[in-house]
Amino acid sequence: MKKLSLLVIGVLSMSNLVAQDISDAVRYSLDEIQGSARFRSMSGAFGALGGDMSAVSINPAGSSIFNESHASISLSNFNVNNDVNYFNGFSSSSNSNIDLNQTGAAFVFRNTNQNSPWRKFVISVAYDKVSDFDNDWFASGTNTNSIDSYFLAYAQGLRLDEISALPGESLSDAYSEIGSFYGFGNQQAFLGYESYILEPDSDTDDNTTYFSSIAPGNFDQEYSYAARGYNGKFAFNISSQFKDNLYIGLNLNSHFINYEKSTFLKETNSNAGSIVNEVRFQNNLATTGSGFSFQLGAIAKLSEEFRAGLTYNSPTWYTIAEETTQYLATVRDDAGTNVTQIIDPFVVNIFPEYKLQTPGKLTGSLAYVFGEQGLISFDYSRKDYGSTKFKPTSDPYFASQNNFMSDNLKIASTYRLGGEYRYKQLSFRGGYRMEESPYKNDSFYGDLKGFSLGLGYNFGNTKLDLAFDQSDRNVNNQLYSVGLTDAASIDTKNTNVTLSLAFTL
């Protein structure tokens, strides 16, 4: 019987209300500084160079390279192209947008005391977009695994009276109350049961085992993914030049996350014995977050030509809040008549805030400067993604996820190489980068490889720069974290065109 015994047990505040997982942690741990056009055209290899506002986001000592106060602003056209394979289906999609991805200013104060070894002090503020989440793709194919496995995975072991509506109670009220009393997993089981996908072994309140009304066979599936948002960073920077050959700096960073995702699955079947022949399942997620990190950096002039840089990025400590909405509809055969069951609760699930600590990073850099003619630069970064943590670590669910991340994520290296050649007022630039996968199984989430090209023109006190860069990564994206865990294979190509204006203040 569809009945819920309403015991007053309070609103759960632990993480089992919603299933944060490894994909969330990796999404907010990746830091691909969008940057100025000069920065992007050299693939971000600026750790030992400085003299660029986006370089300050890599090494805080970089602002001391400026001889005069400086400001810049950058616009970028960001394009994502996805080639998607899902069983026997193939599709392509693209998404493009134009956005402000960098701005900042550095203010140089020279020391008038000729006897002091501290030559100058620099204070700067900068904004950089760290990650762009805008993405759309579509997958379709014929699978032998049904969405019923998702609902069964949540339902097995739960009492029937904890996943069903009271007599006379609306589905919307029941969905809301079950979420408040029992959590996210019970809500998913409720959707499966009230949509007739699941049936109990016995129609009693204490029943805890269920079977599917969808018969085995082939399932035609269409899956749509759409995401919007970004991860941004404001940096307050202070740096100084000591004597003629040493530059040191500190960044205090304020981070913010704005992320929205919507997925929609349509599944149909004509399998003999199936009562439910069509399922439409939509999930929407809205995430906001704020965080803090700091950076310490130094640049040393080993000679007139050689420079070396070293930067420590602390972990970023985030506080994240999430909201979700869901919709489920099924079409079933009821004595030869197709009947549609719609569960559209019009309920926004607001989950308790949780903490995320992303890994720190260490970057070493080398550069060789050919006088006024040009330069070549190399950066190497190392980040231990296995140290990523959900908090509080005393929470059993977070503890299990932290152990899972420790077992499946690894120390990943990033290599960036860039060069610049100057001819009169013109600058010609290029670069290459390779970022290792954060996963131990890189066939699941591949390495990123990219190249860049750029031009710059120096008008004197004003500089105009243009950059083109492109990167490629292969990812197997699971449709759901439980049950229907089949993955769409996605070859993602990111293309950017960036225009920057920099000027002396």
Image: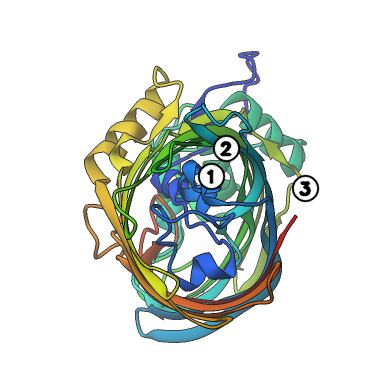
**Vertical position of residue 473 compared to residue 183: above or below:** below
Q: Earlier in the sequence, mark 1 or mark 3?
A: 1
Classify residue 163 as left or right of residue 377: right
Res 181 seen here: yes
Q: What residue is drawn where x is 42% and y is 38%?
A: 297
Q: Residues within 10 Å of mark 2 (few under 14, many from 20)?
A: many
**Vertical position of residue 184 compared to residue 395: above or below:** below
Q: On the image, numbered disc 2 is attached to which residue?
A: 120
Kind of residue at disc 3:
Phe
Q: On the image, numbered disc 3 is attached to which residue?
A: 346
**Vertical position of residue 504 compared to residue 252: above or below:** below
Under tag 2, what secondary structure? strand
Disc 1 + disc 2, Cβ < 8 Å: yes
Mark 2–mark 3 Cα distance, whole angstroms, equals 59 Å
Tell me the quadrant of the picture where the N terminus can be found.
Answer: top right
Q: On the image, numbered disc 1 is attached to which residue?
A: 64
Kind of residue at disc 1:
Ser
Of the two numbered discs 1 and 3 in the rendering, the one whose residue sits closer to the viewer? 1
| Residue 401 x, y percent position in the rendering | 35, 35
Q: Residues within 10 Å of mark 3 (few under 14, many from 20)?
A: few
Q: What residue is drawn where x is 45% and y is 46%?
A: 59
Q: What residue is drawn where x is 65% and y is 50%?
A: 127
Tell me the quadrant of the picture where the C terminus can be found.
Answer: bottom right
| Residue 192 x, y percent position in the rendering | 54, 50
Classify residue 457 as left or right of residue 25: right
Q: In this view of the protein, which residue sits in the foreground, 312 or 439?
A: 312
